[in-house]
Amino acid sequence: MSGAQASEPAFLPDIAPLTDFPDPSRATRRDGLFLPPEMPRLLTPGMTKRQVYALLGVPHFHEGLFGERRWDYILNFYTGSKTAYRICRLQLRWGHRMRLAGLAWSSEDCRAAVYPLPEKSDTVLLQPPEGAQALALTLYFDFDKVDLSEKARQDLAAFVTSDAGSDHKLSVTGFTDGAGPDAYNDRLSLMRADMVAKSLVGLGVPLANLQVSGAGERSPAVAAEGAMREALNRRVIVRIMEGSGMGR
């Protein structure tokens, strides 16, 4: 790889539960394979088995070249802390004419080792022009949760006291990642928005100034294929609405 930087992927693989992977005691190489992250990053839907074989070698669970619909690997990635490494499971799924149809990693940490994402903080505050107030605030949530972190509560309070909150009408819109049924995600996104709205009311924002809605998994911040547990999509965005006393 000689320092070559991988380009941004056009897709992100799935995250699958460990129960979807074969028993590691049945692996032909239980110690796994050490690879630079750039190598599995080259895997792309549409590749043939021979192309994947040339990249990763033989699968680790007695899975043959012909007829098999899944190949499974145990891959190890150094964490950057001395000799520590992370053990990851990768599953390749073969579709029509035995072309690579999909990939699944055993955890978000493993996927992030190969497809690094932008660092996520509890909140993201859109920067306004110097001397002006913030126009929007984004709050992030843990998987399948509606509770605000302490840091998010502090930043929400700062957003209100910076003259962004109490004197203006605010839209509060909740979002989810792509995991789970659409109806469940619609409800979850609204519950997240409601939680933020309650916190705003507790900070002195009149309820009449809030427009609360849930967008489910629609309009993701990061595009992801399939039922993805994408952390950057689990969010609520609080925006100052146009024409709400800002002179805009």
Image (cartoon, helix red, strand yellow):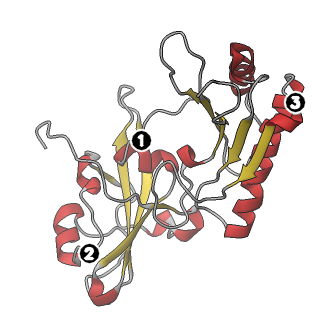
The residues tagged by marks 3 and 2 sit, at their Cα atoms, a distance apart of 54 Å
**Circle 3: element type:** loop
Task: Specify which label sits upstream in the sequence, 1 or 2.
Answer: 2
**What residue type is disc 1 on?**
Leu
Depth check, front residue: 232 or 74: 232
* Residue that mark 1 sits on: 117
- Judged left or right of residue 95, residue 201 is right
Circle 2: element type: loop
Q: Quadrant of residue 66?
A: bottom left
Mark 1 in CB contact with mark 2 (< 8 angstroms): no
Left or right position of 207 against 121: right
- The residue singled out by tag 3 in the image is 206
Q: Which residue is situated farthest in the left direction here?
A: 2
The disc, 3 or 2, on the residue closer to the chain's N-terminal end is 2
User: In the image, which is nearer the foreground, mark 3 or mark 2?
Assistant: 3
Q: Is residue 181 above or below residue 231?
A: below
Q: Please tell me how crowded label 3 is: few (under 14), some (14-19), or many (20+) other residues with Cα within 10 Å.
A: some
Give the quarter of the image for residue 188: bottom right
Q: Which residue occupies the foreground of this view, 2 or 161?
A: 161
**Circle on res. 46:** 2
Crowd rating for badge 2 (residues with CA inside 10 Å; few <14, some 14–19, many 20+): some
Of the 4 image quadrants, the one containing the C terminus is: top right
Tag 2: amino acid? Gly
